[in-house]
Amino acid sequence: IEAIWTQFKDKPVYRRWLLDALPAVGTPVILKFIKEKFLAGKCTTPEFIQALVVALQTVPANLDTIRLTASLAMERKIATIPALREVVMLGHGSMIAKHCVEVPTCPAELLRPIHELIGEAISKNDIPEITLALKVLGNAGHPASLKPIMKILPLLKSAAAAMPIRVQVDAILALRNIAKKEPKLVQPVVLQLVFDRALHPEVRMVASIVLFETRPSVALMSSLAGYLKTETNMHVASFSYSYIKSLTRITAPDMATVAGAANVAIKLMSCKLDRLSFRFSRALQQDFYHTPLMIGVAGSAYMINDATTILPRAVVAKARAYLAGASADVLEIGVRTEGIQEALLKSPAADESVDSNTKVKRTLKALANWRTLPTNQPLASAYVKLLGQEMAYLNIDKTIIEEAIPTVTGPKSREMLKGALKALREGISVQYTKPLLASEVRRILPTAVGVPIELSLYTSAVAATSLKVKATITPPLPEDIDTMTLGQLKRTDVELQAEARPSVALQTFAVMGVNTDLIQAAVTAKGKIHVNAPGKVVARADILKGNFKVELLPVEVPEHIAAVSFETLAVVRNIENPTSERIVPLVPEVSQQKSQTSYDDSSSEIPDETPVRAPGPFKQICIIIFGIRWCFNVYSHNAAFIRKAALYYMIGKHSARVAVARAEGPEVERLELEVQVGPRAAERLGKQNRLIDEDTPEGKAFLLKLKEILETGGKTESDSSESSSGSSVSSQSSSMSSSRVTDTATTMEPFRKFHKDRYMAPHGASKGRSSGSRQSSFEAVQKQNLGNDNPPVFAVIARVVRADEPLGYQLAAYFDKSTARVLLVVSSVAENDNQKICVDGFPLSKHKAAAKVSWGPECKQYSVTAKLEAGVLGKYPAARLELEWERLPVIFTTYAKMLSKHIPTMACHTGFSAERAKNSEKEIEVTAALPTQRFLNVIVRVPEMTLSRMTIPLPGAVPINPDGTLSIHVDEDIRSWIQKYIEEE
């Protein structure tokens, strides 16, 4: 190893490969080698951290490697770099945990230095050192660490109660790995913390997380549920209730007993806790487990709030995986904002007597005055765990901010910016390669046959990319960046050319069989993945003209840009001739299978074995997109003819490939995406979006022809629908009768609209009288062809530039200041294509807005109109959304009828009540009302049915008063600035 390092250490590409490959060797020699090179100054700190983190995961854990990592943590050079020392210490704890897994009787002496370290830190009240020691003990997870950790827990009014809350939380979290080994030791400790109402709510909620991870029994869960019935802190009650309720839905086998205990406990608790909003602390857990394959995934999320906090105090997310009866916590990320919370609470923003606008101003001012915060208190912290082991954590405090600001705003940052601009003008060429040994597992198990069976899994991957970037700036920017003005930047035309060739190659081998000196026979599964996707891009930005363009240029691509293969084989080798081995596929091309034809037992004739060819379909799908031909080739030759099961579908040979080539026809020069803002937008459009006016002779002739086409299609549709009307009616009636749908009409308050300072008449009484005037005003504004009389404010064009004519689509946006009307038109760039999509929206009044989506030839074939208005429902502020249509495509109506059969069932599952009603057949109406700022009432009217649900809890308070006004104050300066900016435009 030393000779290889000496030969290639001065070559950057080889040096990176060595530093990536050496930790994968997984021997103590490599760990010692990395240590010596770093202490000798022959590798940088980032290189050392990268190699060390991988080596600590691959090196076998024994007493020698544990002593080596312990000595590494004590080195003076490492101790002077806090981040590096944290990585080494956390790795030392993980190494002890790995050793204790292999040797269950591992001595507590291994942790004596850490126990002495935490004792000394407690006596000196050294908070950072206490935190680091707790995380190391948490990684080790040794039961002997319970006593030192309990010195920091706030039990029996001990001196540890004076510790900061974040330290108490870290001490509780350090019990999680201990709880997995000795749950009976941890349960009394954390249960006492949960029951102590004198403690901070966050400490109690974190203790409940550890308690539930110990997989409590029915008795313990019932005791907790009984105690929570008298809980006075709503955050603790909401967190525990939501956690227990989420446990009732767990389907993983290892959590079956916990799910049963949670079902018992949830029945003992009050269902009122289920109606609490998300401003209270919550725990969510969801999983999926497939029993036949014994695989599954689970996700957990914890949000810890406080009555006095503005932001959540802590947010934790965790992912768990199940495979072949084993389970592991794959990834966990946690964030805490305790320091920010305390800084905000000490500021005048915490005064509840002021309005929301003043609170926001004071909050921003408090954050701006970060220099007044104490140095020893972190503003926020975060940690990352992989496979249950904490890999790194970060505390953001005043010191880090003070060190970061000069780096960003100082002369060093300006020099870096100047160097980057110079390198871009001259051109940058970068090549990067990252190899990875993802897995290397080998297990030998005894069997009753008398020979051992070996299980092995090897996975390796290599990611590589080459990147070339060059920028052309016209006119050139000044050499001194500090003298550059905003006007100079606006007059700059920037062109950026980039060519990248990323590729990924992955290989995996799985072996199961006998591997001895006399017998060597195994079943092997081989998988390969190769992806190579080159690309060449040219981006231009003309800030003064408001033009931005991105071009994809042709580039040479391999035959297949992506290829995946998987194959299962049987391997046999004779010990007398090791060089000759026999490899045969598990699923041969022709397999002998006994005929399944029945025959008479008394007959002496037995049917012969007939050859049955295992199905091996080859499928090819080719599509052409923008002149590029994409072909997907799939081949699967499996053993599903034996049994229709997942394992038999996997056995065999499978492959999938993706090929990209030029399509037949005119040559494609490039793909373009262009955005033009401002008065030049009309010039960039390939063709003008002039809609046909219905009052002109040309418009009348077009509408007459379109009407004939629609009538012909309508007759065909009605004939096909009548043939199946009997079955559809009977099936719909049967599904409606079987679902929970009632005929009793619910007495609902009418919706009243705002009109100046008064309410208009109820919705039912006024609809017939006022709908005509509303509809006429809506149509009168829409008849004014905004696209014909006004230039677009911006345009977006996506096209394929070919030798003959371009293909693609263009979007034009129009705006009328007098009516605040917005029109979006999407059309093809081809001259002979009149298919368009139009979105037309504008406010009808202060409390009402309308929009119309139409599409088809000249946007005249189909349309949907949406109206949104504010008002009151009874005495509560409300909003109503109406969707109306005259004609929709057949596919829309077909799927809508299929979906309507399942609406009652879905309503039942989501807590809505469904009632039959004679509503409009071409209208959907959704009304939402706020009885309070934290609850919502929803009423949905669809054809033949009305759905409703009352008092739906909201995640936060909605700042709307009963009269429809906002309860927050908008700063007049901000409002006038926005109005002035719009007028200037």
Image (cartoon, grey):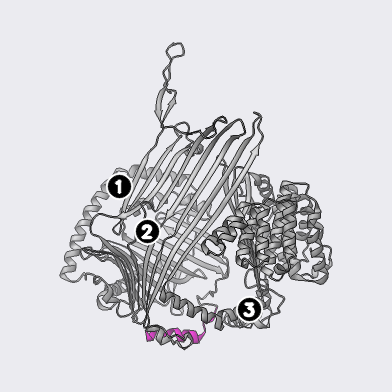
Q: Main secondary structure of the magenta part?
A: helix
Find the distance from the CA under tag 1 to the CA under tag 3: 73 Å
Q: Is residue 762 left or right of residue 237?
A: left
Task: Mark 2 vs mark 1: give the one in front.
Answer: 1
Give the quarter of the image for residue 240.
Answer: bottom right
Kind of residue at badge 3: Glu
Residue at 55% across, 71% down: 958
Quadrant the N terminus occupies: bottom right
What span is colored magenta in the figure?
968-985
Find the distance from the CA under tag 2 to the CA under tag 1: 20 Å
Q: Is residue 492 left or right of residue 186?
A: left
Q: Position of residue 956 (x, y in %)?
A: 58, 68
- From the image, tell me which residue sits under label 2: 920
Task: Mark 3 or mark 2: name the one nearer the start of the chain.
Answer: 3
Say which element carries label 2. loop
Residue at 63% across, 50% down: 328
